[in-house]
Amino acid sequence: MPVLVQEQGIGRGEPNIAAVMEVLSPGSSGDETTTHHPVPHVLTSRNRSFLLENTEYAVFDMTRPDAIDVRVHSADARIRVLHGESPLELIERLTEFTGRMRPPPAWLDEGAIVAIARPPQEAPEIVDRLVAAGAPLAAVWTQTWCGTARTVLGEQVLWNWVARPGWDDYVAALAQRGTRPLCYVNPMFRDLPPEAPDTTRNLFREATEGGFVVRTDDGKPYLLKQGVFDVALLDLSNPAAREWMRDVLVVEMLGAGCQGWMADFAEALPFDGVLASGEDAAAWHNRYPVEWARLNHQALEAAGALDRTLVFHRSGFTRTPEFSGMQWHGDHTVTWDRYDGLASALHGLLNGGFSGIALNHSDAGGCTVVPLIEPPVERTPELLMRWVEMNAFTAVLRTHEGNQPAVNAQVWSSGALIRHFARFARVYRGLAPIRRTLFQEASARGLPVVRHMAMHHPDLARAWEVHDQFLLGPDVLVAPVLTPCVDANDCVVKPAVWLPPGTWVHAWSGAAHAFGPDGSDLDVDGPLGRPPVFVRQDSEAAHVMDEVLREVAAW
């Protein structure tokens, strides 16, 4: 297991996708160990736990049955051994070192975040359709707030973090509809192409001329290839660069009405780059996303906006939780599989919880289309619905149009999709009392919102084996449907769910199931719109769920 912040790859080793991507671009598909957010932390079923404090590149060899071999590219290895009598205690000890994630702003409880990167005139109409159908929306995430540029790959975000012409009118249109805009930024800058819209600033020129970017040995800006254009990377070791970028975030983003943003990337610091501080870039590589999160945190703090702004990051390392308001998994493929699809999004939730990442989530429906294989990998309505169902029971319900919106099903693509999305946006909103308690636990103790079964049932071997369901806190059990229907006209899915000891009530039917000290497996119907969800009888969560279902039924 390499401990290296890096692009996850396309498909992360899924055989069919890898077979094509590795021919087109060797190394581009990644594998199941490639990740934006590695954490060199081990926690075992015997309540043994240790953390490698180093930021330098390391490798964990997990192949031996009797030992774990750790090798770190440093003159010294700093290992912190943690003590606790349960997984939750060990996570508390871990997060005393990593830091703990702050609660999200209160407005997140209002509903879902829907991604709309369409032309400005189209977005309000889409919002109207969703709201008219009963979908509560907390925010609209607009990746193209700074404008777009056309390349041979199509229309892409213009990497110049200044509002596009007409942005103020767009913000006002959303405000009239009772929602708010979220934006997009990353620590890289593209020189403006001739066809770029008019703008007040060229951040690429400012950053390169001001000495705010990573450089090569000969003192020139180190240009990185991003698809078909080159970008310069912010030098976070440079105090002047940090101050300049902090002002960009405050003036150009908060000042433009952005009430949060996706703080993307931060994996790209080249090992042979030259930093203003004179420090070794290779040793800084895993530290870079932590400093990117710290800079965003400092900008919000300077503006007095920490409590009202949602910033979510893709990349991270051990100390990221101290500064991040939310993490997300990056660009999953629009597939069902455990490599990089829906099942892997669930695994990311579970692994993140063991790693100090208490608040994390995935794009509902995934992001990456792979058109070059047969049949093409494109998002189906069924996949989108199942992903929305799962994410309604996590920290955030947020959609993504995907890298090729035209071939992906969207939550507004049909009446059935709109109604389904509205149903689960209402479920998400109704679960706010449960989530808000868990947000406070995350802030105070480092405990994750979404929890592996073993966190609350560590003495049962079966709890450690289950990887296709999760707990929302201790009392809500969710088993997402992770496989498509065989027959779309007769969709009957019966997932096997493991229920722990005690009495659990099936959320949709009200049927109660009581089990002894070992728990039991149970086959459950999981039709579209009714994924297997259970609540512990007589718990506070059961009362909240009753209210949720009554409200949804009345709607």
Image (cartoon, rainbow, N blue to C red):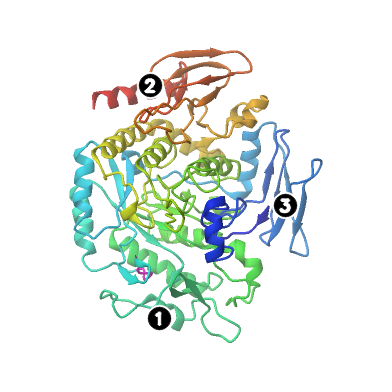
Q: Residue furthest front?
A: 374
Question: In the rendering, at what x and y percent does residue 66 appear?
Answer: 82, 41
Give above or below for 191 relative to 111. Answer: below
Q: Secondary structure at mark 1?
A: helix
Real-space CA distance between mark 3 and mark 2, rounded to the nearest whole angstrom: 43 Å
Q: Are marks 3 and 2 in contact (CB under 8 Å)?
A: no
First in residue order: circle 3 vs circle 2: 3
Query: Main SS type for the magenta part?
Result: loop
Task: Tell me which amino acid carries mark 1.
Answer: Arg
> Within 10 angstroms of label 3, few (less than 14), some, or many (20 or more) residues?
some
> Within 10 angstroms of label 2, few (less than 14), some, or many (20 or more) residues?
some
Q: Secondary structure at mark 3?
A: strand
> Which residue bears the numbered disc 1?
205
User: If the image is split into quadrants, where does the C terminus sit?
Assistant: top left
Kindly tell me whether residue 36 is visible in this rendering. Answer: no
Real-space CA distance between mark 1 and mark 3, rounded to the nearest whole angstrom: 41 Å
Q: Residue at x 53, y 12 (%)?
A: 514
First in residue order: circle 2 vs circle 1: 1
Q: Residue at x 20, y 52 (%)?
A: 124
Q: Residue furthest right?
A: 66
> Which residue bears the numbered disc 2?
508
Task: Tell me which amino acid carries mark 2.
Answer: Trp
Q: Secondary structure at mark 2?
A: loop
Question: In the rendering, at what x and y percent does residue 290 appear?
Answer: 55, 59
Residue 45 appears left or right of 192: right
Real-space CA distance between mark 2 and mark 1, rounded to the nearest whole angstrom: 57 Å
Q: Is residue 485 magenta?
A: no
Q: Which residues are magenta?
A: 156-161
Work out whether residue 520 or residue 264 is closer to the camera in this orientation and state it. 520
> Which residue bears the numbered disc 3?
60
